[in-house]
Image (cartoon, rainbow, N blue to C red):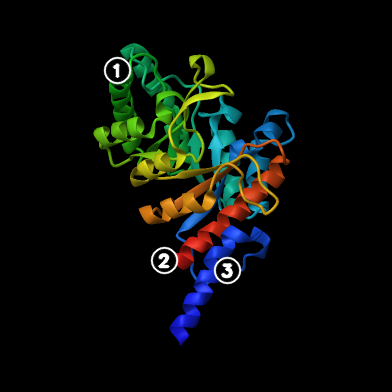
Amino acid sequence: MHRFLLSLLLFAVITSCKNKSIDDVQLPDNKVPEIKISLAQWSFHRALRNGEMDNVQFIKKAAEMGFSGVEYVNQFFIDKAQDTAFLNQLKTTAQRHNIQQVLIMIDEEGNLADTSLTAREEAVVRHQKWIDAATYLGCHAIRVNLYGYGDKKDVAQAGMDGLSKLADYAATKNLNILVENHGGYSSDAAWLTDIVKSVNKPNLGTLPDFSNFCIQYEGGNMWGTNCTEAFDKYLGVQLMMPYAKGISAKSFDFGEMGYETSIDYNRMMEIIFKSGFSGYIGVEYEGDSFSEEKGTQMTKKLLEKCIKEQQIKM
């Protein structure tokens, strides 16, 4: 009898996440989750770019909103990788607010899969200063892009070389290199994971993003508005999870009940939990319908609810 009642209770709780507003879902909190939630700096990219927020204030905002970690984007301090005074500001603020500095996302430092050996090796060197900065801050990783142009196989071969060399340098600092699905060939999860598997370095992994699976946009462009070739987002995350050392929970818009309108978060979390992942999931709101703070809050709330639902199923 008790087992029957327990089964009914679990069924009611699990199905409620699909049928009710997230505000109506009451889930037990009797398990300490192995997954923590961090705030990706890109969630506030408008405020940071227009001067309404600086990098130190971003850390304080993360603490105020209940995050336990932050994920930086180097675009917001592109000339500060070797500025010890600036890095100390970040470090001190994070320590004061009990915030873990998780990683730095690296852009605009050259193509690690460039088919030109000279250009590729220059990109590796340019990334090294960010490995040093991340180590100084106490991060566990940097996130890199795997861009290159030309034949897909040639770019893959170049990417193996670039990542291998960068991972070797990062290993001397006890730091991880994480590759994100982030446009072009890298949005082909099968292509990307084949490269990571082939390089086979313990400190090289992936950072699956819930959304960045458009391989090509109209006109043959890497970025745009009309996607003409895409990899299935759920299959993509599933393929990347065995190598994942971080996750980016992307969001754009929400319906009346608080669920993301283009990404099934329940399905994503089921994939993540089945993989056995443990670590940080970064919230990255990128929409226009809500303010950056409101959209970030809604993403965090949805993520927390769906994490708890998966815990119940375990």
Whether residue 55 is visible: yes
Asked if residue 33 is positioned above or below residue 229 in the image, the reply reads below
Whole-angstrom CA distance, mark 3 to mark 1, is: 50 Å
Earlier sequence position, callout 2 versus callout 3: 3
- Within 10 angstroms of label 1, few (less than 14), some, or many (20 or more) residues? some
Amino acid of disc 3? Leu
Query: How many C-alpha atoms fall within 10 Å of the one at disc 3: few (<14), some, or many (≥20)?
Result: some
Which is more toward the observer, 97 or 254? 254
Q: In this view, does 16 lie above or below 5?
A: above
User: Could you give the CA–CA distance between mark 2 and mark 1, rounded to whole angstroms?
Assistant: 43 Å
The residue carrying mark 1 is 154
Q: Which of marks 2 and 1 is nearer the N terminus?
A: 1
What residue did someone put label 2 on?
314
**Left or right placement of residue 293 versus residue 71 in this view:** right
Q: Where is residue 129 in the image (x, y as percent from the top left)?
A: 44, 28
Q: Position of residue 44 (x, y in %)?
A: 66, 37
Look at the picture and state if 169 lies above or below 16: above
Circle 2 or circle 1, nearest the eye: 2
Q: Which of marks 3 and 1 is nearer the N terminus?
A: 3
How many discs mark residues in the rendered view?
3
Report the disc number at residue 27. Answer: 3
Relative to residue 25, is residue 223 drawn left or right? left
Label 2: which secondary element? loop
Q: Indicate the position of residue 223 as horizontal and vertical percent values.
A: 54, 22
